[in-house]
Image: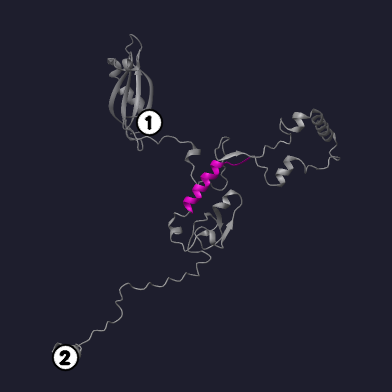
């Protein structure tokens, strides 16, 4: 039988009349003075009724105290089942819980805080694997078994040596070479992570910002721009001007500000073009007509 059919039954008369018992149970569970008027009741099943009382506790607007009472078959005594505070149809509820990894925003990380990255973080990809063993299809392991055995024998010989006889001589290993080149990292920035970082930096210090629109020149020609390595050098650098709003920040090469190193040399305004209609000079107009013209007419 469905829950809707069960709740549609007529409430048990004795359980429905046990309002005082339900109120006493709600007042015992709640703080003094927070249980309000009896709101409604619902039949939960045969001889099982839930009474709802208004909750007046601050911060729980629209909540109700729900007290369930029941009685056994052929019994005249109503007993208490449970009491709990439940939200009503118009209850004020807390926002849906969001994991901390989704609530975190730039700038939230403080001193002593740890921000672990997930194993499948799209911003990262595997870097150096850390293994000195050659790949399975390499010349050592794939096509030359004898050479592979000799390599294993040499490794065993080095392992069996006493610590005093073992001199650190691992410059030829992949691990030491990667560490010497600064490449021994478990994960590196992925292409997705690189693009998202570039979009974020360009939004803050890019060509479309109001500061860049009013700048005399772009950062690409500024002497305070510190170049960066890698593919980012094609579009970004680091500002080293202490008076710039982007000091110490990664800026787009098309960004700019009033602290440009060449801002002191202001370009001269172009000369004004010659007017099409000269309204500044004076025009000669004779005050009297030519005397010879008057004699001819005569």
Closer to us: 96 or 220: 220
- What whole-number distance in Å separates the C-alpha atoms at marks 2 and 1? 127 Å
Return the x and y of residue 37 as percentages of the image width and height.
28, 29
- Which residue carries the number 2 mark? 295
Is 195 included in the stretch rendered in magenta?
yes
As drawn, the residue found furthest toward the top would be: 74
Position of residue 69 in the picture relative to residue 138 (left or right): left
- Which residue carries the number 1 mark? 30
In terms of secondary structure, where does tag 2 sit?
helix
Q: Which residues are magenta?
A: 187-205
The chief SS type of the magenta part is helix
Closer to us: 63 or 166: 166
Q: Quadrant of the C terminus?
A: bottom left
Is 19 included in the stretch rendered in magenta?
no
Q: Quadrant of the N terminus?
A: top left
Please tell me which of labels 2 and 1 falls first in the chain.
1
For label 1, the crowd category at 10 Å Cα-Cα, with few meaning under 14, some 14 to 19 and many 20 or more, is: some
Residues under numbered marks 2 and 1 in contact, where contact means CB atoms less than 8 Å apart: no
In terms of secondary structure, where does tag 1 sit?
loop
Q: Residue at the location (28% across, 27% down)?
A: 38
Q: Is residue 71 above or below residue 106?
A: above
Return the x and y of residue 206 as percentages of the image width and height.
48, 54
Return the x and y of residue 75 as percentages of the image width and height.
33, 10
Colour theme: one colour
């Amino acid at each position: 039988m469905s829950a809707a059919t069960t709740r549609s039954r007529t409430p048990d008369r004795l359980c429905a009349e046990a309002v005082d018992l339900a109120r006493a149970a709600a007042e015992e569970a709640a703080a003094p003075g927070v249980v309000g008027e009896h709101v409604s009741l619902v039949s939960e099943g045969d001889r099982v009724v839930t009474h709802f009382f208004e909750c007046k506790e601050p911060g729980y607007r629209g909540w109700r105290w729900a007290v369930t009472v029941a009685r056994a078959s052929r019994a005249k005594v109503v007993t208490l089942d449970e009491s709990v505070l439940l939200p009503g149809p118009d209850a004020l509820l807390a926002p849906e819980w969001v994991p901390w990894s989704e609530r975190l925003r730039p700038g939230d990380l403080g001193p002593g805080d740890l921000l672990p990255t997930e194993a499948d973080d799209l911003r990262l990809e595997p870097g150096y694997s850390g293994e000195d063993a050659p790949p399975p299809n390499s010349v050592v392991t794939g096509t030359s078994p004898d050479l592979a055995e000799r390599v294993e024998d040499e490794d065993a010989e080095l392992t069996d040596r006493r610590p005093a006889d073992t001199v650190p001589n691992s410059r030829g290993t992949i691990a030491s070479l990667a560490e010497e080149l600064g490449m021994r990292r478990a994960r590196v920035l992925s292409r997705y992570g690189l693009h998202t970082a570039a979009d974020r930096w360009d939004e803050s210090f890019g060509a479309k910002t109001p500061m860049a629109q009013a700048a005399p020149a772009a950062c690409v020609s500024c002497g305070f721009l510190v170049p960066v390595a890698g593919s980012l050098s094609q579009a970004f650098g680091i500002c080293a001007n202490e008076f710039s709003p982007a000091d110490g920040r990664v800026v787009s090469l098309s960004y700019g500000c009033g602290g440009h190193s060449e801002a002191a040399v202001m370009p001269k305004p172009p000369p004004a073009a010659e007017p099409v209609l000269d309204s500044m000079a004076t025009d000669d107009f004779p005050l009297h007509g030519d005397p010879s013209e008057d004699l001819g007419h005569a």
